[in-house]
Amino acid sequence: MISSPPSNTIKDDGKGNQVQTATLMVEGMTCDGCVKAITRALEAIPGVHAVRVSLEKGSVAIDYDPKETGPSNFAPSIEAAGFTVIG
Ligand SMILES: [Cu+2]
């Protein structure tokens, strides 16, 4: 399996707000229930705008406002939902 480093990109939402995207590799996601659980857990964090889960890649991409939150808040929420963050 090829492992890639977590990516971190910044873009502008067109309204002058910064939106940053963090991509985490997560182990243990197998079905739509897992996708919903992770999405719900992350969207509950203030400053998280959008969550995109790929079961195929085992990745979770999180769009967030860097003024409000950051990747250090994401892993604990994912793990609290019962999954393991591996990268
Ligand atoms: Cu599941």
Image (tube, helix red, strand yellow):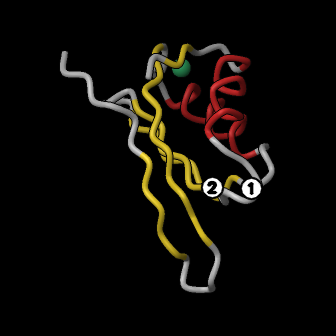
Residue 73, how many percent across, how many down? Answer: 71, 34
Q: Which residue, given by chain and number where applicable, does mark 2 sit on?
A: 64
The residue located at (45%, 40%) in the rendering is 23
C-alpha separation, residue under disc 1 versus residue under disc 2: 6 Å
Q: Is residue 23 above or below residue 16?
A: above
Q: Disc 2 beta carbon < 8 A from ligand 1? A: no
Give 66 or 32, whichever is nearer the viewer. 66
> In the rendering, which numbered label is found on residue 60?
none
Residue 24, how many percent across, how many down? Answer: 47, 32
Give 59 or 14, whichever is nearer the viewer. 14
Element type at mark 2: strand
Q: Are marks 1 and 2 in contact (CB under 8 Å)?
A: yes
Q: Which residue, given by chain and number where applicable, does mark 1 sit on?
A: 47
Determine the residue located farthest toward the left in the rendered image.
2
6 relative position to 76: left or right: left
Between discs 1 and 2, the one toward the N terminus: 1
Element type at mark 1: loop
The residue located at (49%, 47%) in the rendering is 52
Circle 2: residue type: Tyr
Q: Is residue 71 above or below residue 12?
A: above
Circle 1: residue type: Gly
The residue located at (39%, 43%) in the rendering is 7
